[in-house]
Image: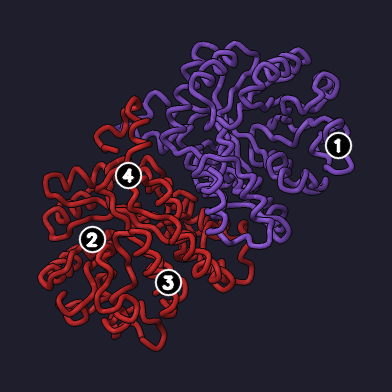
Chain colours: A purple, B red
Amino acid sequence: MNPDTATTESEAPERWVAYRPEIKILDCTIRDGGLINDHGFGDDFARSVYNACVAAGVDYIEIGYKASKRIYSPAQFGAWKFCDEDALRRITGDTPAPGTKISVMADAERTDYKQDILPKKKSVIDCIRVACYIHQVPMALDMLQDARDKGYDTMLQLMAVSVIPESELNAALELAAHSVAEAVYLVDSFGALYSEQVHNLISLYLKHMQGTGKEIGFHGHNNQQLAFANTIEAIVAGANRLDATINGIGRGAGNCPMELLIGFLHNPKFQIRPILQCCRDTIMPLSRDIEWGYRVPYAITGRLNQHPRPAIKFRSGPTPDDYVAFYDQMVEEE
Amino acid sequence: MNPDTATTESEAPERWVAYRPEIKILDCTIRDGGLINDHGFGDDFARSVYNACVAAGVDYIEIGYKASKRIYSPAQFGAWKFCDEDALRRITGDTPAPGTKISVMADAERTDYKQDILPKKKSVIDCIRVACYIHQVPMALDMLQDARDKGYDTMLQLMAVSVIPESELNAALELAAHSVAEAVYLVDSFGALYSEQVHNLISLYLKHMQGTGKEIGFHGHNNQQLAFANTIEAIVAGANRLDATINGIGRGAGNCPMELLIGFLHNPKFQIRPILQCCRDTIMPLSRDIEWGYRVPYAITGRLNQHPRPAIKFRSGPTPDDYVAFYDQMVEEE
């Protein structure tokens, strides 16, 4: 699969049988799934997901955040909110499997990065993924540089792209192109984008990164049942870094399901069976206690290009299935 | 939205704000949802869905099948397996609302069409949609002609397109182009198609129908969470007839959700609120007794381009969440 030929219909059959070896996938089951339960997953859960990703040939596993303990109390949040070195090593051992890199997310303004991110040689972490909103780009660039100086791979996660004005997005992408980040992610935080918009945005990201050697990534949300479809569209447009979670677990409507993504990629290095096993043994039992996946309120916030926060709140309220009341409330608020 | 400009990036913004008035939507909640429970929905259910579709401005509502009572016993199947005239009139009254046409599906070889389909002037039905597999095309053409002669609009539903060899598909489309059908549907019966394949197939259907005035339709399934995305792709490629069901209800992984489709189309004649109301009051209460929507076994059959039958059977067996066992069984069988 070559992005240059993406729209050449006559070459399609070849592309459906071959694969693009540059594509790398990142599992954020523990990190994004942890947003549902304040990162309260136990060690057994994290170990099961980690082992499944290693066995499946997943390129990166993002275990959690490096959140500031000044802002978030360790009494209220689980281990994967902070990803202390000893906690990580309980999952990965002192010598993580070489095929699967360890990533953590560092939120701009919510990470004491200078002190909490250790020099690379003292950590099992391979990669720091810095997440920021558009107004936090300068802060994010400083965080990327700090992580790079400490010896890490770095990635930039520019959130909520569907509400960034085009001129500001262009400016941010120019800064990103000159940053140390090895990959820049298109992030559909609100699950609002349709495939064609993803295609156009990936093309824009690629244009800005041209000649830098940086890769483009995509992180979707399933509010309108488009997380997997948009991930495919990102691939077709040229993105080589893709996020997914097992069974699509994640806050609200969740993410692109890893089992579907691996099914789509034909790279023989990816194995679906360990993912199915972890899904059966570790992920699905959670569905008795926590909820994720498509529900109508998420479709409504996605359609309105808004953060799913009110929908998540509504789903935990007294009338979670009163879609009409939720719709009226959201349209009223506009 | 003009299909001719579908791939012209620079015109995209205009297309996202405007709408294509030629697009007509068909609700098959009662017909496809009925496949889950042998068409056992009561009159109240059918009336609620019908009234919601009328209020929402849905163009067609497909209430059920005209199945042969020689093959299917009325003791075992509900009213919407047969759609007798008196049953239909209990829902629509003698004078159905003019904005929403009544459609029924007639399966090749499973319909006593010559006797069971009345002359149009004796029926509230507006449209006969003939469904067939590739080997039944000659039978389907006879059924279409019979329905047309009786005064009905007609549509052709060529099923399981993902396993039809290209040469046979081309031959079938040529026959369809010379038939009386006013619309020909691309049907992804196995939920196996990716968006790009949908795009190419719709283009092929359009090429064959060129100059005939016939419309192309799309009916997707959600086995790989692509029913809505593929419906959008069909629109972009030029399809003007689209199937959906409320909350995506339908056998197995279900269909394209009507609430998402109406959210995507910007035609002011479509109203989402009556659909949300019916979803809340009539559809979601069913989920206590019957299951529909994405589950991993459907992803596996979709990926393998096979009928979801074994996945549906597995879901009603003793270990519905043992995805590994199901995967091993399906791969073994290949």
In the image, residue A199 sits, relative to residue B276, either above or below, namely above
Q: Earlier in the sequence, mark 2 or mark 4?
A: 2
Relative to the observer, which residue lies in front, A147 or B71?
Answer: A147
Q: Which residue is mark 4?
A: B235
Q: Which residue is mark 1?
A: A87
Residue pictured at 50% horizontal, 47% vertical = A224
What residue type is disc 3 on? Ser
Picture coordinates of residue A284, whole percent (x, y): 68, 56
What residue type is disc 2 on? Leu
Chain identity of mark 1: A
Disc number lying in front (4 or 3): 3
Whether residue B161 sits left or right of residue B180 in the image: it is right
Around disc 1, counting alpha carbons within 10 Å, would you say few (fewer than 14), some (14 to 19), or many (20 or more)? some
Picture coordinates of residue B78, whole percent (x, y): 40, 81
Q: Same subunit under labels 1 and 2?
A: no
Q: Earlier in the sequence, mark 4 or mark 3?
A: 3
**Element under label 4?**
helix
Q: Which residue is mark 2?
A: B156
Q: Same subunit under labels 2 and 4?
A: yes
Q: Quadrant of residue B158?
A: bottom left
What residue type is disc 4 on? Ile
